[in-house]
Image (spheres, coloured by chain):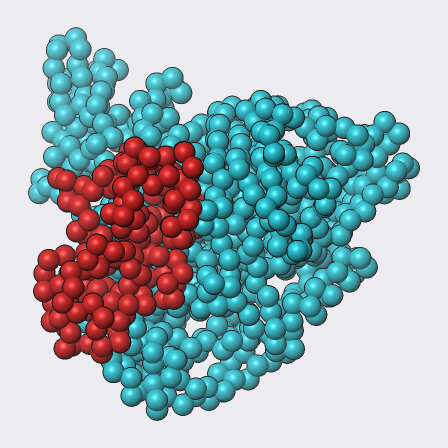
C-alpha cells in the first residue's frame, strides 16, 4: 500500500460513503440495482415465491434466506435466517442460506452501505428481517384464503403450512408459491410477540458448524475459478512509500512465475501457484521513494503522543459538563498504548476477474459496497457490471472493512487480463494492516471528602479511526469512534470533560474489534479502580454509585459479582473487575488472576452481558468467550512497533497472540433485558484487560499504564 | 515429478522438490480444506497427517513425503462416520470463523494416536495451534467429550 493509494482510498471512501450516508445518489450508486439478482441456488423448477429481497420460498418447501452480512465467525449466517424463519413460521431445517450479492437492497439501514461492523447486524436487521418473514407469511396465508374462499383471518400457520382449523385442511407453503406471488404485499404485516417465537432464542446450533469441521466451508483463499492465477505483491515496507524502480529478472526465473507487473500498491508477481508467487516476490529487488514517515519510530511517535496528551495542543472538546475547577483530592495519570494488528487467521486475499464484460470479485470482505465501488473505478466499468461474491471470512475483527486487498486483485487481473487470486503472506498481513491505533491518554479526577468521584477530565490522543475507514469527519474534526468509552461514558460523573486530539501519526489507523473502546475502556476502568482504592471503597460499589440511572449496567455488574463470588477469589488468586459498553450492550468481567513471574495468569474469567434478546444463545456465548480471549491476547503480549517508518514484527513468532496454554476458563452469563437484540461481537474485548490489570494491582500493588502487559510489568 | 499419496489416492505432480506440501495439496491437487496461516510452522492451520503423525505442511517439502501416506481434513472422517473429534466439535459448537479448525482437528487427532486421553495440561503442552476467534475453551471441552479426558491436570 502506498500513500497515494491510501489517500485515493480515503478520498474515494469519503465520497462514496458520504453520498450514501446522505441518501443522495452518488454517481456510481445510480446504477446500483435496487433488488437482488435471481438466486443461483434456487432449487426446484416450478415457480418460486420471492416476496422481497430477503427470501425465496421454493415449491419443495425449502426457503432460501439471503444473508446480507458477512459471516466471519460471529454467527450472522445462522442468526439472520433464524429471525426470518421464525416470522415466516417454518421449521429451521427448511432454511437454505445464501450470501447476498452487493445490492442497494442489502444496505445497512444505519450505515446506508452494505457493511458488517460495529456489532450492529442483529440490532439493525431485526425489524427488516422480521418484517420480511411476516410479510411473506401473510401473502402465503392470503393465497390459501383465496384458494379456499375463506377469510384470511380464520387461518393460522404452523411449521411451513397454512392451516384452516374450521374446515380441517392444510396447504404447505411450497404448494402456494405460485398463488402467493400475486397477492398484495402487506404494508404492515403483523409480527409475533416475544412469547410467540418458536426459533428465536431456541435455535442454539450453528448452520455452518458441519462445514467447518470437515474442510468444506469455502473461504476467500479457497476460491478456484477456471484459468485463474495466483499473485503476491511486494509492498513498500515504509508507510506512505512508493515503488521507484524494481528488477524482476530473478523473480521471472522462479519456476511457475508467469509475469511481474506494477500495480498502484506495489509490484505483483503472478504465478501458477501461491508458493511460486511468494518465491518470486522474495526474488524481486526494488527501490522506493520513502517519504517523511521513513524517519518515524515507535520512540519518536510515543514522545509526540505524550507531548500532545500533556500539552493538549489541538484538543477538540467532546464533552464539557459541569465545572472545570472542582475542589478535592486530585489524581492524575498518563497512559500509552501500542498499535496492534488484527491478524485474522485467514490472511488477506481476494480473487478477481476483469473482462470486457465487467468485474467479478470473490472475497472475504466486510464492505461489499465499497469493494464494488472501487472495483468499478479501477476497472473503468459501471457499478452495475461489478459482481461481488462474499465467501466465508476466516476472521474479520474489522480488518476486512478495508478494500486494499480487493483493489489489488482487481488491479492485477486488469493488468494480466486473467482471473487472479491475490494472496498475502502473514508478513504482508502483519506489516500492512490498518492497526488498532497507538494512543496516549491523560486523565485526571477529583474525589470529594467522602471519597465520591466528582470530577474527571480525559484527553485522548489517537489517530482517527473513522478517517481510516473513509467516513467523513464532522467539521470539528471530532472522531466519536476514537473517543468511544470516553465521550459516551455511561458513568454519572457530575463534572466531566473529554477532549480529542488527532495526531495524524502516519500509521494506518484501523478499526479493530471494539475500536476506540478497546483502549479507552482500559484507561477508564483501571483509573476507576485506582480511584476506588484511593477512596477506600469496593470497586464494585464505587462503580454502582456512578451507574444509578442505568439498571441494565447495574444488573450486569451485580450478576458478575455474584457469579464470580466477588471478594472471595479462589486460593492463590485475586479478583479484578471491569465494565464495558458497546452497541447498546453493557458487559462486566471479573478476572481471577495469579502471577507467573511477571506475567499475569488468568485462571477464570466471569463475563455477564445484557444482550436484549439472545437470538442464538450459543452464538452469544461464543462471541463473549472469543472476545474475552481476543482482548486478553492483546493485553498479554501483542504489539506493533515501528522503526525507520516500517513495522518491525513479521509473523506469529514476533507478533505474539494467545494460544491454548494461556486461555482461561470462561464463564458466561447472558441477561435479556431489552426489547430487541443488542450488539454481541465486540464488547467482550473491552473489560478483560482492565479486569486483569486490576487483579494484578490486588496481587502486587503495580498499576499498568500501558499494554501489552509485557511492557507494563517488565521483568 | 513427485508422487504423493493423499487420502489414499496417488498424485504424480510436476512440482519442485522443495515446494511445501501445503501448496501441493491446495494449489496443485486442489484440496482446499487444509489452510495457510503463517508459512513458518507457527499457527498450525496447515496441519496434516503423514503416516500417523501430525505435521505442519507449510514447511514440509514434498520430496520428504513422497510415497508416504498423507491424510488431510477431507479424509479425517466421513459424513456417515465422522471422526469422534469432528462429532464432538459439532456437539460443543467449537468453530466460529472456522478457518483454523481443520488444523486444530488434525493436530489433536494426531495427538490422540499417541495419547488417547489427553488432559487439559497435555493440550496446553502439546497443542500450539492458534485460534484468533478464541475457541480454546470449547476445544478443551470437545476433546474431553470425545476422549473421556478433561479437567484433571
User: Which corner quadrant holds the N terminus of chain B?
Assistant: bottom left
Look at 27% across and 56% down and name the residue there.
Answer: B54
- In this view, the residue in front, A34 or A116, is A116
**Residue that appears at 17% across and 11% down:** A165
Residue A552 position (above or below residue A309): above
Q: Which chain is cyan?
A: A
Where is A286 relative to B98, above or below? below
Residue that extends furthest to the right in the rendered view of this protein: A327
Q: Quadrant of residue A410?
A: bottom left
**Quarter of the C terminus of chain B within the rendering:** top left
Chain painted red? B
Residue at 58% in and 29% down: A570
Res A447 → quadrant = top right
Measured as percent of width and height from the top left, residue B76 is found at 19, 49
Residue B29, given in percent of the width and then of the height, sits at 17, 65
Q: Position of residue A320 (x, y in %)?
A: 78, 43
Q: Nearer the viewer, residue A219 or A408?
A: A219
Residue A180 x/y as whole percent: 19, 31
Image-quadrant location for residue A621: top left
Depth check, front residue: A665 or A21: A665
Q: Is residue A1 visible?
A: yes
Residue at position x 86%, y 41% in the image: A330
Amino acid at each position: 500500500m502506498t500513500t497515494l493509494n491510501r489517500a485515493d482510498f480515503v478520498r474515494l471512501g469519503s465520497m462514496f460513503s458520504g453520498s450514501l450516508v446522505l441518501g443522495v445518489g452518488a454517481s456510481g450508486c445510480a446504477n446500483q440495482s435496487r433488488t437482488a439478482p435471481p438466486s443461483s441456488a434456487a432449487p426446484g423448477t416450478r415457480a418460486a415465491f420471492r416476496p422481497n429481497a430477503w427470501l425465496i420460498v421454493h415449491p419443495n418447501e425449502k426457503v432460501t434466506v439471503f444473508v446480507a452480512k458477512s459471516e466471519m465467525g460471529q454467527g450472522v449466517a445462522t442468526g439472520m435466517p433464524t429471525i426470518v424463519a421464525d416470522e415466516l413460521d417454518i421449521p429451521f431445517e427448511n432454511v437454505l442460506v445464501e450470501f447476498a450479492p452487493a445490492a442497494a437492497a442489502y444496505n445497512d439501514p444505519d450505515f446506508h452501505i452494505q457493511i458488517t461492523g460495529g456489532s450492529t447486524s442483529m440490532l439493525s436487521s431485526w425489524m427488516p428481517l422480521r418484517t420480511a418473514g411476516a410479510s411473506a407469511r401473510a401473502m402465503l396465508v392470503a393465497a390459501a384464503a383465496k384458494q379456499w374462499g375463506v377469510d384470511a383471518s380464520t387461518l393460522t400457520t404452523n411449521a411451513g403450512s397454512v392451516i384452516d382449523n374450521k374446515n380441517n385442511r392444510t396447504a404447505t407453503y411450497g404448494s402456494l408459491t405460485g398463488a402467493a406471488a400475486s397477492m398484495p404485499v402487506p404494508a404492515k404485516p403483523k409480527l409475533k410477540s416475544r412469547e410467540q417465537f418458536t426459533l428465536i432464542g431456541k435455535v442454539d446450533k450453528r448452520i455452518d458448524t458441519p462445514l467447518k469441521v470437515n474442510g468444506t466451508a469455502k473461504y476467500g483463499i479457497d476460491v478456484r475459478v477456471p484459468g485463474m492465477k495466483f499473485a503476491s505483491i511486494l509492498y513498500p515496507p515504509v508507510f506512505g512509500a512508493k515503488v521507484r524502480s524494481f528488477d524482476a529478472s530473478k523473480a521471472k526465473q522462479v519456476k511457475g512465475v508467469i509475469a511481474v507487473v506494477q500495480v498502484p500498491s506495489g509490484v505483483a508477481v503472478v504465478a501458477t501457484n501461491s508458493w511460486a508467487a511468494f518465491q518470486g516476490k522474495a526474488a524481486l529487488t526494488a527501490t522506493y521513494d520513502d517519504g517523511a514517515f521513513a524517519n518515524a519510530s515507535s520512540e519518536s511517535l510515543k514522545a509526540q503522543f505524550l507531548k500532545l496528551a500533556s500539552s493538549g495542543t489541538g484538543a477538540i472538546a467532546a464533552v464539557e459538563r459541569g465545572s472545570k475547577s472542582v475542589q478535592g483530592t486530585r489524581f492524575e495519570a498518563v497512559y500509552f498504548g501500542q498499535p496492534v494488528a488484527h491478524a485474522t487467521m485467514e490472511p488477506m486475499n481476494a480473487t478477481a476477474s476483469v473482462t470486457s464484460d465487467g468485474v467479478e470479485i470473490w472475497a472475504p470482505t466486510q464492505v461489499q459496497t465499497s469493494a464494488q465501488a472501487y472495483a468499478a473505478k479501477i476497472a473503468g466499468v459501471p457499478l452495475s457490471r461489478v459482481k461481488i461474491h462474499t465467501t466465508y471470512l476466516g476472521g474479520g475483527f474489522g480488518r476486512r472493512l478495508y478494500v486494499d486487498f480487493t483493489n489489488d486483485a482487481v488491479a492485477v487481473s486488469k493488468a494480466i487480463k486473467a482471473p487472479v487470486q491475490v494472496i498475502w503472506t502473514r508478513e504482508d498481513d502483519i506489516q500492512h494492516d490498518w492497526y488498532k491505533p497507538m494512543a496516549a491518554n491523560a486523565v485526571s479526577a477529583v474525589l470529594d471528602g467522602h471519597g465520591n468521584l466528582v470530577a474527571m477530565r480525559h484527553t485522548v490522543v489517537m489517530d482517527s479511526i473513522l478517517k481510516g475507514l473513509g467516513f467523513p469527519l464532522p467539521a470539528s474534526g471530532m472522531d466519536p469512534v476514537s473517543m468511544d468509552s470516553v465521550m459516551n461514558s455511561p458513568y454519572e460523573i457530575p463534572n466531566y470533560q473529554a477532549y480529542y486530539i488527532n495526531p495524524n501519526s502516519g500509521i494506518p489507523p484501523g478499526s479493530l474489534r471494539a475500536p476506540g473502546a478497546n483502549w479507552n475502556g482500559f484507561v477508564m476502568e483501571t483509573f476507576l479502580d485506582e480511584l476506588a482504592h484511593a477512596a477506600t471503597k469496593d470497586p464494585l460499589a464505587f462503580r454502582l454509585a456512578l451507574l444509578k440511572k442505568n439498571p441494565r449496567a447495574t444488573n450486569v455488574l451485580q450478576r458478575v459479582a455474584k457469579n464470580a463470588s466477588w471478594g472471595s477469589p479462589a486460593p492463590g488468586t485475586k479478583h479484578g473487575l471491569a465494565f464495558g459498553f458497546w452497541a447498546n450492550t453493557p458487559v462486566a468481567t471479573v478476572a481471577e488472576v495469579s502471577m507467573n513471574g511477571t506475567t499475569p495468569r488468568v485462571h477464570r474469567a466471569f463475563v455477564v452481558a445484557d444482550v436484549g434478546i439472545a437470538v442464538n444463545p450459543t452464538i452469544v456465548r461464543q462471541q463473549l468467550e472469543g472476545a474475552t480471549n481476543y482482548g486478553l491476547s492483546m493485553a498479554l503480549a501483542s504489539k506493533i512497533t515501528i522503526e525507520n517508518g516500517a513495522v518491525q514484527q513479521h509473523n506469529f513468532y514476533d507478533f505474539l497472540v494467545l494460544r491454548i496454554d494461556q486461555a482461561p476458563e470462561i464463564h458466561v452469563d447472558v441477561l435479556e433485558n431489552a426489547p430487541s437484540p443488542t450488539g454481541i461481537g465486540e464488547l467482550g474485548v473491552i473489560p478483560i484487560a482492565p479486569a486483569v490489570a486490576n487483579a494484578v494491582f490486588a496481587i502486587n500493588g503495580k498499576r499498568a499504564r500501558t499494554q501489552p502487559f509485557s511492557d507494563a510489568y517488565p521483568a | 515429478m513427485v508422487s504423493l499419496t493423499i487420502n489414499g489416492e496417488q498424485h504424480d505432480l510436476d512440482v519442485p522438490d522443495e515446494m511445501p506440501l501445503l501448496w501441493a495439496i491446495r494449489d496443485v491437487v486442489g484440496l482446499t480444506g487444509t489452510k495457510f496461516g503463517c508459512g513458518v510452522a507457527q499457527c498450525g492451520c496447515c496441519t496434516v497427517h503423514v503416516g500417523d503423525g501430525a505435521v505442519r505442511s507449510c514447511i514440509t517439502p514434498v520430496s520428504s513425503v513422497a510415497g508416504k501416506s498423507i491424510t488431510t481434513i477431507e479424509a479425517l472422517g466421513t459424513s456417515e462416520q465422522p471422526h469422534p473429534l469432528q462429532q464432538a466439535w459439532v456437539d460443543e459448537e467449537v468453530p466460529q470463523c472456522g478457518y483454523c479448525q481443520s488444523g486444530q482437528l488434525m493436530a489433536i487427532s494426531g495427538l490422540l494416536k499417541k495419547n488417547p486421553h489427553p488432559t487439559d495440561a497435555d493440550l496446553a503442552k502439546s497443542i500450539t495451534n492458534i485460534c484468533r476467534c478464541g475457541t480454546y475453551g470449547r476445544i478443551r471441552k470437545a476433546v474431553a467429550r470425545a476422549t473421556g479426558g478433561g479437567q484433571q491436570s
